[in-house]
Amino acid sequence: MLLTPALKRRWLILCLLGWLLSTPCYAHLLNMTRVSVVLHEAEAGELLVEIDLGQSLMGAADYWALAKAEGDERSRRLAPVLEALERGLTLRIDGANVGRTFVDAQFEAASLAAIENPLTPQMAQLRWRLPPTAGSVLSVELAPDFEVPWPCLVRSDSDRRTLPVSRLLTADRLSSGALALTEQHPSEAGQDSIIDLLMVYGFLGFQHILPLGLDHVLFVLGLFFLGGGVRQLVALVSCFTVAHSLTLALATFRIVDLPAELVEPLIAASIVYVGLERLLVTDSGALVRQKLRYGVVFSFGLLHGLGFARVLGEVGLPDGQFLLSLLAFNVGVELGQLFVLLLAFLCFGFFQNRSWYASCIATPGATVVAGVGLYWLIQRISV
Amino acid sequence: MTESWKQRGQVTGRLLAVVAVALVLLAVDRARAVLHEPIVFDPAGRAPGVFPERWIHGSKSAMDNEDPPVQVHAYNEHTIILRENKAINYEGAFMYLFFGNGRVLLIDQGSTSSPALFPLREVVDEVVSDWAEARGVPEPELIVANSHLHGDHYAAWNQFVDRPNTVLVGLTHEEMMAFWGFTDFPTERIEFDLGGRLLIVTGSPGHQGSELSFYDSWTDLLYTGDMFYRGRLYLDDWAAWAASIQRLGAIADEFPVAHLVNNHIEMTSTAGVDYPIGTTWQPDEPPMQMTRAMLDVAIEATEKIDKPGIYIYDDFMIYNEIPWATTTDP
């Protein structure tokens, strides 16, 4: 059954009214822009832009004329479009602009009416050649005054990745951000420069103490509650730091590899120990002799380093900046530990010489540390 | 002697305190586990659900429209259907949230990018947060996926880019295939465990080459995206679509499909009559959900149609390999 002509006219009028009265309903989704970047390490790459020129950089009539033109006439009409695309669409690899050479263009143009109607998109395909690159990060950016039919889908392919990476550019997000060209999965954001890389991995390290590394936080607090003065605390924390830095590096380079099922319960056991060390001090002496304590803390540091390495392994390290990223991660971890100690000092440090410090702060604190450690130990063993 | 006993007593007391702390934490853990037993999504039964009497369907004047930009409808407590306001975009696209234990799947992100016009992220955040709060569980991980790769279904994808606890499947065919684990697209059936809720994912190209369909074993809903809905079925590849429809028929034969759900409504409630493309007010919409009988009509069509053209049926129109956005409008 079909609508009568009168009914159809009514619908058409309603449709047109709706169209005219509302800008929000007018969407260019059928003619959205696509930017595809293919990069190779040893051979030329390609930039392909699919764009509705008749609805963006050119008027419909100009696009119709361009599509029909041939030879020099076509080149003359195309020149301003290429210039606009050169200015409005920027590719950067590792922060540096990438030059490109125009190759060819194809124009879909069924009719002038079709070009004028955004619901019947007539897309142009423009192709450039890109130089070979060994860079690690690509970004695609549109100039603020570059009006394309939104959204703009960006696709990046690299012969050093298995999968492409996709991003969507919109009027309020004009940059793809960093798109990794190598097979890795760190946070791909903000690695345009060495500074950004240090910031990203430093932050990741810090984050793996606070707020994500509660077990490492408790261990450090356990050391704090051991008491013995600032000098001894610094010495113990240094032992811990040296040890976990060592295993973090060894495990990252895959020289040491222990299963998480073993490492995680042992980390929990180390927390129990450091709490008990405080609680079991009696007049007859500490649980272990002072000199041995450094050895014990060093051993536990080795274990915690394996824990950090597992987390870092999940994030990944960029191929080109392996050592630097590892160093930044480690620095982040240290800053996280120092921050925990600073907080502990600010909260409890001023009372260390009071008579009630041991009974009201250190002993209850160590009890909580050991208790939580025991809870984790049972939990991790049962898992 | 007395001093020694005193010390031993002190040490024992401290050890008992440590054990007590651990036991209290273990007890809290146990209590939480009992209170928040995982939801059982039993595939043997059929979880009931309801569709709205009528969907919000735009207005005569889009500018004067006072409906929410995103209609939120709970098909049941763990299945939410969203619809973009037709006054914002004529596509009036449907989007779906399927909740499982610890994971929630968002299929499609509508036709409008601007969060000011179409605050999809805000709406999804609220729905997910309310769902988690009602159950006293942490917010589940959000999987941002797509039925297929047309811009009217991922325009607001960017709104989720910086969302924590979120997995973005990606907007390329390769990323989609890798995420779902396809090695033999489109014929393969993938069993996807959405936290105890089993989804069967299969390829259904024809309208677009990367299209997926989902069968939810808990609700028995068969989601057919853009490849089968009450409207103009624009087909790029007839052979692929015909094979996809037949595969969906096989799923409907094998599983007790309750309803076919999808992405748009373009038909009127008069058989064989559609709204013109671009319509922002559809007061005479039929329901969105479709029936097995309608799928059978499509299967029958795959056996009869052998050349490009427009084929009109009561509940849908097949636009077979004809130029995009061609319409039957005057």
Image (spheres, coloured by chain):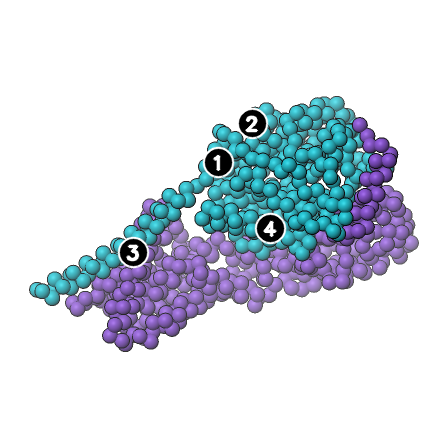
Chain A takes which shade in the image?
purple
Distance Cα–Cα, label 1 vs label 4? 25 Å
Residues tagged 3 and 2 counted as in contact (Cβ below 8 A): no
Distance Cα–Cα, label 1 vs label 2? 16 Å
Q: Callout 2 environment at 10 Å: few (<14), some (14 to 19), or many (20+)? A: some
Q: Callout 1 environment at 10 Å: few (<14), some (14 to 19), or many (20+)? A: many
First in sequence: mark 3 or mark 2? 3
Which residue in the structure is indicated by mark 1?
Answer: B41
- The answer to which of A188 and A284 lies nearer the viewer is A284
Q: Residue furthest left?
A: B1
Distance Cα–Cα, label 4 vs label 2? 32 Å
Nearer the observer: mark 4 or 2; the answer is: 4
Give the left or right position of residue A349, taking residue A26 as reference: left
3 and 2 marks on the same chain: yes
Q: Callout 4 environment at 10 Å: few (<14), some (14 to 19), or many (20+)? A: some
The residue depicted at 65 percent of the width and 64 percent of the height is A95
Nearer the observer: mark 1 or 4; the answer is: 4
Residues tagged 1 and 2 counted as in contact (Cβ below 8 A): no
3 and 1 marks on the same chain: yes
Q: Which mark is residue B21?
A: 3
Subunit that carries the residue with mark 1: B
First in sequence: mark 1 or mark 4? 1
